[in-house]
Image: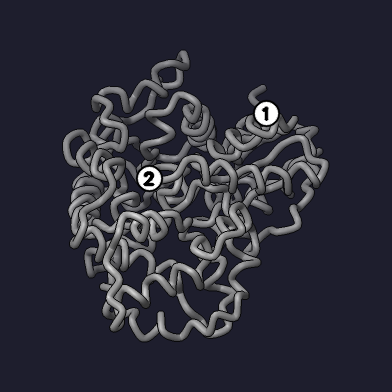
């Protein structure tokens, strides 16, 4: 990951045109200049040039209130990659001022027990054990073609257990050779990488890759958009090498299985809208696969939101924002839920456990009569188990 000096010239290219205001979810939620790309860039430039503004608590707060969604960057006339500049500045601030208490706690938990919550390692398998018969025949830390890397949130937050449970049922139905890492699974390190702690993220990456290779794994499966982006984009950069592993998101696998007729499904009578996760869509260019899945489900009607695909608005859960400013995260989520409600759909489908959590929170805060599910849950619902 590049340091702040690398981006100094790029930061100076901001002409303050204000184009980023339209695309920034935190600006939409606050209507305040320090919450948009050009405002943050002005603060960053002031910290680097002759004005030499110190990294005050307010400065740190503004830098950490960016969702890193990348929507401003893809629509920036001078081509400024604001989210990369923000990440580099977070690392600079971590060196000069340290990190927030919340991120420090997460970092400490990952170092000690391998997850963001500080849960005991054995809790990684509670999601598997609380569905009768689900664990039957499942390999844990054994050699296989695929390894399912479930991630911290789906395995440690009961509200998200349904995602790995659904995906595991699909994997068993597909008869693929797979294993899970169970108690030995460690966080992918994404909160560290984007929070300004690339060296700690690098150590996590090395440990995860070495463990997978020791099991002879050739393909890594994820249901988490951030885990997918971390493995496919950050790991090669952090480690300075090719992984020697194929990284596959659940939407890629499910689209392939359904298109090939390898999963028998029944009719699903739902009107849905699809929320593109930032890490999966805009940052990883996986737009077609989830839509292919829904097109292959009989009875399903998809209604797109006004902002979809590469233009999709963030759910409010990106960039560690929920950790640093849960109130702002909730406001952003509410804006996205309003857009979903306007489609007339009864269900929001997404492909990221964090998106599911934040959108559920936004819907609850708005008292919106709309359900939020992961695409794995949708496919599992459609499986013809008879």
- The answer to whether residue 39 is above or below residue 65 is below
Is label 1 in a helix, a strand or a loop? loop
Question: Which mark is on residue 55?
Answer: none
Would residue 247 be visible to someone looking at this image? no
Pick the front one: 138 or 191? 191
- The answer to whether residue 75 is above or below residue 247 is below
Q: Assess whether mark 1 and mark 2 are in contact (beta carbons under 8 angstroms).
A: no
Counting from the top left corner in percent of width and height, residue 63 is at 39, 60
Residue 82's quadrant in the figure? Answer: bottom left
- The quadrant of the rendering that contains the N terminus is bottom left
The type of colouring in the image is one colour
Counting from the top left corner in percent of width and height, residue 182 is at 30, 31
Q: Is residue 144 left or right of residue 290?
A: left
For the point 53% across and 56% down, the residue is: 278
Q: Is residue 88 left or right of residue 153?
A: left
Residue at mark 1:
384
Residue 102's quadrant in the figure? Answer: top left
Residue 238's quadrant in the figure? Answer: bottom left
Nearer-N-terminus badge (2/1) = 2
- The answer to whether residue 107 is above or below residue 6 is above
Total number of numbered labels? 2
For the point 54% across and 48% down, the residue is: 316
Is label 2 in a helix, a strand or a loop? strand
Pick the front one: 113 or 132? 113
Question: Which mark is on residue 146?
Answer: 2
For the point 61% across and 58% down, the residue is: 31
Would residue 154 be visible to someone looking at this image? yes
Q: CA distance from mark 2 to mark 1?
A: 24 Å
Pick the front one: 264 or 52? 52
Crowding at label 2, few (<14), some or many (≥20) Cα neighbours within 10 Å?
many
Crowding at label 1, few (<14), some or many (≥20) Cα neighbours within 10 Å?
few
Counting from the top left corner in percent of width and height, residue 176 is at 45, 40
């Amino acid at each position: 990951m590049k340091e702040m000096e690398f981006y100094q010239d790029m930061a100076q290219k901001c002409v303050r045109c204000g184009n980023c205001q339209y695309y920034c979810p935190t600006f939409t939620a606050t209507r305040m200049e320090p919450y948009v790309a050009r405002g943050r860039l002005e603060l960053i430039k002031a910290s680097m040039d002759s004005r030499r503004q110190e990294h005050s608590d307010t400065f740190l707060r503004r830098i950490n209130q960016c969702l890193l969604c990348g929507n401003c960057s893809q629509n920036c006339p001078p081509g400024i990659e604001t989210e990369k500049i923000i990440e580099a500045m977070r690392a600079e601030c971590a060196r000069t001022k340290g990190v927030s208490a919340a991120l420090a706690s997460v970092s400490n938990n990952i170092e000690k027990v391998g997850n963001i919550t500080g849960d005991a390692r054995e809790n990684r398998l509670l999601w598997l054990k609380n569905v009768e018969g689900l664990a039957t025949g499942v390999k844990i830390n054994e050699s296989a073609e695929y390894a399912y890397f479930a991630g911290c949130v789906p395995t440690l937050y009961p509200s998200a257990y349904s995602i790995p449970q659904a995906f595991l049922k699909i994997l068993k139905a597909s008869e693929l050779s797979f294993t899970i890492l169970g108690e030995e699974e460690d966080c992918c390190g994404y909160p560290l990488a984007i929070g300004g702690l690339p060296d700690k993220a690098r150590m996590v990456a090395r440990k995860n890759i070495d463990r997978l290779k020791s099991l002879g794994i050739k393909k890594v499966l994820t249901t988490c958009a951030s885990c997918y982006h971390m493995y496919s984009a950050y790991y090669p950069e952090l480690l300075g090498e090719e992984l020697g592993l194929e990284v596959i998101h659940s939407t890629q696998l499910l689209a392939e299985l359904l298109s090939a007729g390898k999963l028998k499904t029944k009719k699903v009578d739902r009107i849905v809208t699809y929320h593109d996760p930032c890490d999966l869509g805009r940052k990883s260019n996986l737009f077609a696969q989830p839509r292919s899945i829904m097109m292959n489900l009989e009875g399903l009607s998809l209604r797109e939101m006004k902002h979809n695909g590469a233009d999709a608005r963030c759910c409010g859960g990106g960039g560690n924002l929920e950790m640093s400013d849960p109130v702002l995260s909730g406001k952003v989520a509410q804006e996205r839920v309003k857009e979903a409600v306007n489609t007339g759909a009864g269900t929001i489908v997404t492909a990221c456990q964090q998106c599911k959590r934040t959108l559920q929170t936004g819907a609850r805060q708005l008292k919106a009569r709309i359900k939020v599910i992961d695409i794995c849950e949708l496919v599992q619902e459609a499986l013809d188990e008879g």
